[in-house]
Image (cartoon, grey):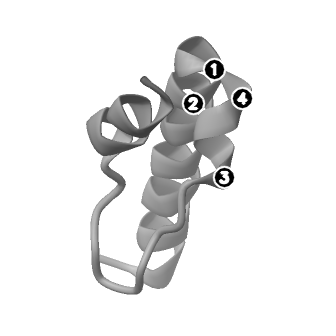
Amino acid sequence: MTHLQLTFLLAISFAIAVVIAAQLGTANIDCVREPGVPYRWAACVSELD
């Protein structure tokens, strides 16, 4: 995988994450992403209950 392909893939992944966050509510944007740890939107939602 070239550097360009990797950059493109990351951009797509980020865009999808933003869309998911917008659908679940802006409060989820406050969730912290630790290095190497995938986003856990479900955990963010449960914290709002």
Judge by depth and name the residue closer to the eye, 6 or 20. 20
Give the spatial CA distance, label 4 vs label 1: 4 Å
First in sequence: mark 2 vs mark 4? 2
Asked if marks 4 and 1 touch (Cβ < 8 Å), the reply is: yes
User: How far is the residue under mark 2 from the one under mark 4?
Assistant: 6 Å
Q: Residue at x 42, y 23 (%)?
A: 49
> Could you tell me the amino acid type at mark 4?
Thr
What residue appears at the point 41 percent right and 39 percent down from the top-left corner? 47
Judged from the image, the secondary structure of the residue bearing numbered disc 1 is loop
Which mark is first along the chain, 2 or 3? 2
The residue furthest top is 23
Identify the amino acid type marked 3: Asp
Q: Secondary structure at mark 3?
A: helix
- Rounded to the nearest angstrom, the CA distance separating label 1 from label 3 is 10 Å
| For the residues bearing labels 1 and 3, Cβ distance under 8 angstroms | no
Callout 4: SS: helix
Asked if disc 1 and disc 2 are in contact, CB closer than 8 Å, the reply is: yes
**What numbered label is drawn on residue 39?**
none
Q: Are marks 3 and 4 in contact (CB under 8 Å)?
A: no
Task: Name the quadrant of the N terminus.
Answer: bottom left
- The residue beneath circle 3 is 30
Residue 26, numbered label: 4
In this image, 33 relative to 30: left or right? left
Residue carrying label 2: 21
Residue 35 in the image: state x and y as whole percent.
40, 86
Q: Which residue is mark 1?
A: 25
Residue at the location (58% across, 38% down)? Answer: 28
